[in-house]
Amino acid sequence: MADVPQLVAQAREGRPRAVARLISLVEGASPQLREVMAALAPLTGGAYVVGLTGSPGVGKSTSTSALVTAYRRAGRRVGVLAVDPSSPFSGGALLGDRVRMSEHASDPGVYIRSMATRGHLGGLAWAAPQAIRVLDAAGCEVILVETVGVGQSEVEIAAQADTSVVLLAPGMGDGIQAAKAGILEIGDVYVVNKADRDGADATARELNHMLGLGEARAPGDWRPPIVRTVASRGEGTDEVVEALEKHRAWMEESGALQRRRVRRAAGEVETIAVTALRERIGDLHGDRRLDELARRIVAGELDPYRAADELVAGLTES
Amino acid sequence: MADVPQLVAQAREGRPRAVARLISLVEGASPQLREVMAALAPLTGGAYVVGLTGSPGVGKSTSTSALVTAYRRAGRRVGVLAVDPSSPFSGGALLGDRVRMSEHASDPGVYIRSMATRGHLGGLAWAAPQAIRVLDAAGCEVILVETVGVGQSEVEIAAQADTSVVLLAPGMGDGIQAAKAGILEIGDVYVVNKADRDGADATARELNHMLGLGEARAPGDWRPPIVRTVASRGEGTDEVVEALEKHRAWMEESGALQRRRVRRAAGEVETIAVTALRERIGDLHGDRRLDELARRIVAGELDPYRAADELVAGLTES
């Protein structure tokens, strides 16, 4: 058994191995998961969570890396959570990208963590918020969550960020792809990466049109900006950071940040509660209690609704 | 509000309108559903439930009608539950079939009830057992449940019968279709209908092969028979009834009937319990309690697991 209080203390001191161990404990749904979460709770809330999503090939990990560089230059501690199977952070990319990332890997002010999307069917939406909590408690001021915008659960994770960045690239009918994947609605900031390529203007125009950015909005509403970048050369990264800071300020002043975080926490509690209840009911398969209730139904002594009541009542006592 | 005790008393006396009213109450998940189920429980367990399933066009409703005739000749009270959208019982067939059925519709010893498969996504597996209970309590000795073997929930309903009949017809690659639909595993009795047509022998042989009926079985195991019928002329119906009676006797003597019914009741309780819990959690969306828990998480006063515990505990108190 891990010494949770010690691990938490070490993570607070900035020891990467303690951070990694804690994430493993929450990710693997270890028996100590609850102990870890209880220990972390009072240490959370300081981090600002930025989600980055987009189709494969738009340059998500290059953009993430450029943002890490920018934040580090400003002296901020950064966490990266990569739930994109094609991300070099999660180990699926070319050597060139990997080398570019390794610069951050040796920086003590950066924590990088990948999460497997495969074999975790539906479990990702549950595990990602817990990993974010660990990075938050470990003192990360900004947490970048990189997801590929193709799966529903990944879109959900991106939508749960304090600020969501949607990335596109010229050509490839990206606008339409993004619309199909449902990621067009979730952007607080849009980035057209690879803006030195042909078609960048057309992509930005198409995006502007699809988002209805030319239309009038109520005063005080957030109008998502479209930023052009060439992330591989670091061009436009400062403008992205500026857009993120503006959105953060708007979120804080308007009260939207608190509302979004409360909604996110409520969804998380709901997911955990439903999962727990389903597991408990699943555990009852072949259980004597359910079997006994079923026997009484077959004998005509009980109806299935009253039996279900007894089952549900028993669940919270066990 | 319906007078449930009176309706139940009238249903016991054989009044079809009372039976119809009770089924409507349970099918529509009325507020009186629980009262109805509690009143019915002590009156159930007397009926034997036979499921009939097969691809469209194999002659399920004609076979069902022929079985009704045979059981009525033997003086048995019969209930028919049609969850097949193409069945004349559920109102989707040709006039000829409809006329053939109307004979039974005027017989006071036969209750016919159709259930809509559309608009009840996933709700059928839940509603069918309740309707079966009403027919059971109303004094039906045999209940025929007709489902088209294409949807998963319909296959589940058929598999929950005391005896499952799988129907096929010559040609159309029925054996393979049946295998794909997953209905080959659930048959206790197989019927090759339209046996006067070319290919009936081939279909029976193919079926025999796919079921491995030529292989050795443990003594005491049930070996599903293959019966040939021409249901439109009533040919082979007596043999089907005989096969059903044999299977029933085997089910009772081997203890398999009790086991199957207990398993069915357990599944039913589980479905009702999960549905109830999900609804209660869904009701909490925007609820002050969940909102309050979420606020405390955001403030770092509580972790999501403890919050989920509180939510679950609250569910059974409410």
Image: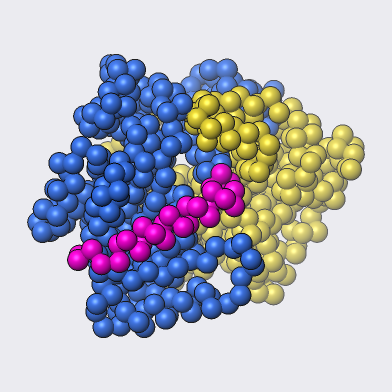
Chain colours: A yellow, B blue
The secondary structure that dominates the magenta segment is helix
Of the pair A198 and B309, the residue shown nearer to us: B309
Residue A209 at x, y = what percent? 29, 53
Question: Which residue occupies 30% across, 83% down?
Answer: B199
Taking A17 as reference, is A315 above or below it?
Answer: above
Q: Looking at the image, is A176 positioned above or below residue B179?
A: above
Q: Check residue B251 for magenta coloring.
A: yes
Point 56% across, 44% down: residue: B258
Give coordinates of residue B176: x percent, y percent. 40, 75
Between A251 and B130, the one nearer to me in the picture? B130
Question: Is residue A192 a member of the stretch shown in magenta?
Answer: no
The residue shown at (10%, 59%) is B96
Q: Which residue lies furthest to the front in this view?
A: B74
Give the magenta range.
B232-259
Can residue B95 be seen at all in this image of the molecule?
Answer: yes
Image coordinates of residue B126 in percent, x first then y, are 42, 40
Residue at (30, 48) in percent of width and height: B74
In the foreground, A206 or B132: B132
- Residue A205 point in image, percent of width and height: 32, 58
